[in-house]
Structures are given as C-alpha cells and as structure tokens.
Image (tube, rainbow, N blue to C red):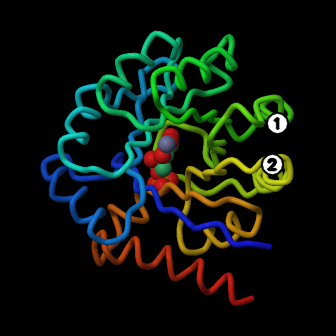
Amino acid sequence: MAQRPLLIAPSILSADFSRLAEQIGEAEQNGADWIHIDVMDGHFVPPITMGQMVTETCRRITDLPLDVHLMVNEPDKMLQSFADAGADHIHVHVEASPNIQQSLQRIHELGCKAGVAINPNTPADKVLSLVGLADIFLVMSVNPGYSGQDFISSVLPKVSKLRAASDAHIQLDGGIDAETLPLALEAGGDVFVAASAIFKHPDGIASGIQTLRSSSLEAQKH
Ligand code: DX5
Ligand code: ZN
C-alpha cells in the first residue's frame, strides 16, 4: 500500500506564549508541517484559550498552514472571522454543529480546508456520511480541553474504520508521543497533533519533533 506522507502538527497550546514567534519559528525550521491552534470558548470545554487575534498573530509569524481546531459552541458564527484571520484549515466538532454538512460547505466557500472533529466517545457512524465532503477527520484521542492527557487507545478502531472508508486526512489529536504515534499510524492516521510532546520536550522543540518522526520510522520497519 502506498505510504501517505506523515504530517506533524505542533499544537501551540503548550507553547511559551511569551516567546510564541520564536517557538513557532523553531517548529517550522525543524520540520513542522502545520501549526495547530486550539480554540476553546469556556462553554464547549471549560477553558478559554485563544481565538482570532492569536490566529492573526500566527499568520504573521509563519507561512505554514494554520490548522484551527474550534472547540466552541455555535461554531458557524465564527467561521468567517477565523478565515479572515488567516486560517487554512478549520475543524468543527460534530458534537457542536447542528448541521455539520452546512458547516463544512461554508468552510469550503471561505476558501479553507474543512475538518470534522470527533470526540473519543462519538462513533465513526456519526461522520461516515461526510466522506467526500470533509478534507480532514480530526479524531480526538483525549477528551478535548487540556493538553498533557493520556492517549485513549479505544479510538483506534474508529481510525481504521474511517481510513477504510475515506482518502481524506485522518488526524489524531491528544496524547500523541513516541509510544502512541506508531499505534495511530498503524491504524491509518496520517497527521499527528502534539502539544506537550513537542513544546514540553525536555531537550526542546527540535528534539520533540525529531523524536516523533523517528518513532514512526521505527514502526514502519516492523
Ligand atoms: C485538546 C487539544 C489538543 C491538545 C493536545 O483539547 O485539542 O490539541 O493540545 O495536547 P497533547 O499533545 O499534550 O495531548
Ligand atoms: Zn486540538
């Protein structure tokens, strides 16, 4: 089977915001493919994190695709403003969108790639009808809200089911590290979000990205 390119999307949720430009620059120079921006509204999930202003700031810092993960209620009201802020990809949670087809179509009209995010307890069946419309399936491997949580391996059969049904990107988000990335890759994932494994790596951001890439190479040998 042809191997899809493996993409790494560092999540700035664990970045040092007092040095955001420097840290994104370091990620970019060391092989990051997309920059993942975790938008939380204090309603869909308890924390309030970042929004359009930080997205605009990231747009000025990097030319990498900005991968905006909306963990918000009523996401449709925010699609235009995130597109205007410079998002390249916008993910909407199927659990938060009353009409997910319409949300994804609107994202396309705004000139962005459309992602559907799926919580760990939401079955693949809830999104299978979106094959052909979604550019990315963002499979949450933790319950959304916080970085640094443990990977939930029971989502892996869902990844395989989506991979069998779709050629879209399948992106894993939550608890991705050198141990869990190979499992997610094996199940059919091709894009890996990591916050703590990159920005909190004891030897720095470059080592964090390198360690994730090497883990995948080890896995592919077997
Ligand atoms: C969780 C966010 C994730 C999170 C991942 O709600 O969507 O993107 O930042 O953090 P780690 O990689 O530390 O699990
Ligand atoms: Zn995320």
Tell me the SS state at disc 1: loop
- Give whichever of 24, 129 is nearer the camera: 129
Q: Residue 39: where, in percent of width, then height?
A: 41, 31
- Give whichever of 4, 124 is nearer the camera: 4
Task: Mark 2: give few (<14), some (14-19) or many (20+) Cα within 10 Å.
Answer: some
Residue 69 vertical position relative to residue 96 in the rendered view, above or below? below
Going 65% across and 14% down the picture, which residue do you hit?
A: 102
- Does residue 66 appear left or right of residue 142 in this picture? left
Is residue 148 at least partly visible in the picture? no
Q: Amino acid at mark 1?
A: Pro
Is residue 162 at least partly visible in the picture? yes
Look at mark 2 in the image and give the residue it sits on: 158
Q: Residue 212: where, in percent of width, then height?
A: 49, 73
Which quarter of the figure is the N terminus placed in? bottom right
**Circles 2 and 1: CB atoms closer than 8 Å:** yes
User: Label 2 vs label 1: CA separation?
Assistant: 7 Å
Q: Amino acid at mark 2?
A: Lys
Residue 2 vertical position relative to residue 200 in the rendered view, above or below? below
Query: Which disc, if any, is residue 115?
Result: none
Which quarter of the figure is the C terminus placed in? bottom right
- Give whichever of 221, 45 is nearer the camera: 221
Q: Residue 220: where, in percent of width, then height?
A: 68, 83
Q: Residue 75: where, in percent of width, then height?
A: 51, 17
Q: Quadrant of residue 138?
A: top right
Look at mark 1 in the image and give the residue it sits on: 123
Does the beta carbon at disc 2 come under 8 Å from ligand 1? no
Q: Quick one: label 2 or label 1, which is nearer the N terminus?
A: 1
Tell me the SS state at disc 2: helix
Going 33% across and 49% down the picture, which residue do you hit?
A: 12
